[in-house]
Structure formats: structure tokens, C-alpha cells
Amino acid sequence: MPDILSAPLVVEFPFTRSLGPVQSAFLTGLRERTVLGVRTDDGTVLVPPVEYDPVTANELGDLVEVAPTGTVTTWAWNPSPRRDQPLDTPFAWVLVRLDGAGTALLHVLDAPGPDAVRTGMRVRIRWAATRTGAITDIACFEPYEGDPGSPEPAPHTGEFADPVTGIVAPARLDYVHTPGRAQSAYIKALEERRTVGERCPSCRKVYVPPRGACPTCGVATAEQVEVGPRGTVTTFCIVNIKAKNLDIEVPYVYAHIALDGADLALHGRIAGIPYDQVRMGLRVEPVWTEGARHVDHYRPTGEPDADYDTYKELV
């Protein structure tokens, strides 16, 4: 039995979104050290504000300003801050109902320890030194023993100079991936420039990459079958947006490729041919780069296109 592989894996991408008038006013307000909420049909002030009433679904736009002070409604201590969290020292996650608001805002509280935090304690916003129009313009909350803010929110137009109209929210997931017996064997075969699948003992289909079980029959698979190296393009898409940290010029083609002898198409990039000449049925072969542990791309073999009936079940 081959050794089971294990490696750290990071999935990361920047999520870019535009802002409507309510979210734009809220984030721009934070940049200006102003906290805005929105009043619902029943008079509740929501902070953070939303664009539609969660009860009636009516559009909301009655913006009001609430105080930078408030009350902790619940909390949880974080003894080991992680990368990119608001503070690099232990802190409390808190829900804070700001004075004048009817709902609580999730943020962090800078406190010396869990014994210093309690439900009902009074806190205030500590503003970031540099503010850009993001929730991080609130650096954190801190304990506060001063006078409470006004319980009555003040009307606000939501108008600011140079409003924030969009944000980029980075998403990242760090974890350790263990592919298991079947995929470990598949990866090790790739190091030898071979592609290996596994055959189902019941339906006799060969799956690449192998999962260790047949997705159709639900039975375990163990019989290894070498497939390819050539294959057929079953379907494809043209990529026109350049991915961050990917050194491939757009446009390029990403395709499903049914390797000869396989009953499942795998993904691969098509090169060596103009993107607008890639087509279903195109016969392709793998191209390896020196020292690589996987196929870099697939290129045309020069063979006649495959007949549709030979791959229609794999589209």
C-alpha cells in the first residue's frame, strides 16, 4: 500500500462587491467616525444597517446616527488570535448594542483577560488611526465608564464627500489536505508521468482521478488502470479574466478531457492552438514541464476529431 500523502493547502481569493446606498453610507460613515443605522417599518434601528426590512422585506432608507458607546450583550474569549484578526493579543469577541440601536454589532473588545469582560459592561469604539471605509475602521471596542450616549438616534442624510462604492473582501481557507489511498496513488503516478484510475468491480467503469469508491455503485475500488495519455475534449470554456498570481495570459481555454480508457473527464488547460480553434472532439495529449509533478497543459495531437458518439456520455 502506498504512503498516504498530506500537505498544507490554501484556498484564497479576493471577493469584490459593489455597495448599495445603505451599505455605502454605513461604511463611508465609519471612515468619518460616524455610525449609521437604518430604521425599520416597526421603528427598530438596525446596526449594521441592511437594505431591506428582515420582517416585511420592504426597502429601507431611513438612516440615523447612533452613539459610539454601547453595552455588551454577549461575548466569547479568544486566547489565541489568528492571522488577520483585528488584534494580535488575546481579546473577546463581543456583540455590542450601541446606544440608540435596537440590534447588536459583532466586533472585538480589547481587554486584559476574560475576568475583565462581562455581559452588560459598557464599552465604546476605539477608532483606527487610518480609516478607509471598512468595518476595520472600528479598530476595536474598549471598556468605558463615562456617560451613556443618547438613546435617541439622530436623523442622517447618509451623504458624505467621496462615498465608498465598493469593497474587496479577501477570503482565505488554510487547511491540511490528506488525499487518501486512491488519490495518493494517483498523485504518485503523476510523478512518473502516468495517469492512473481505478475500475469499479461492479459497473467496470474507470474513474480518473480515483476516489476509492464508485460514485455510481457505491462500492470500493482498488484495481488500478493506466489511462491515456491522449484524450478527447468533451466540453470547454474560454477564460477572459486573469487570475491573481497565475502566470497565464488571457484568453485561454480550460476544458474537460476524457482520457482514453477513462469513464470520467478531468480538467485541463488547452494550449498550442488558438483559443478560438478549440472544439469538442479535439484530440489532445499532455505536455509536462521539467521537474513538474503534474501535467502543465494539453495540446492537439493532429489526429482527426473524435466522433461525438464516442464521448457524448462524458459531456
Image (cartoon, grey):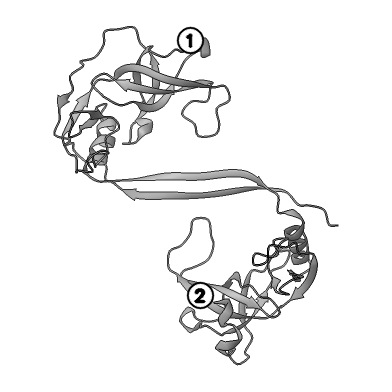
Which residue position is annotated with label 2? 236
Q: State the image quarter where residue 29 is shown.
A: top left
Residue placed furthest toward the bottom = 304
* Figure quadrant of the N terminus: bottom right
Mark 1 and mark 2: span between their CA atoms? 58 Å
Using the image as rendered, state which of residue 142 and residue 41 is in the foreground: 41
Question: Label 2 sits on what residue type?
Answer: Phe
Vertical order, 180 against 287 (above or below): above
Vertical order, 94 against 298 (above or below): above
Mark 2 residue element: strand
Q: Is residue 21 left or right of residue 18?
A: left
Using the image as rendered, state which of residue 266 and residue 124 is in the foreground: 266
Q: Position of residue 84 (x, y in %)?
A: 50, 34
Q: Residue at (45%, 44%) from the top-left corner?
A: 170
Which residue position is annotated with label 1? 116
Mark 2 crowd level (few <14, some 14–19, many ≥20, 10 Å Cα): some
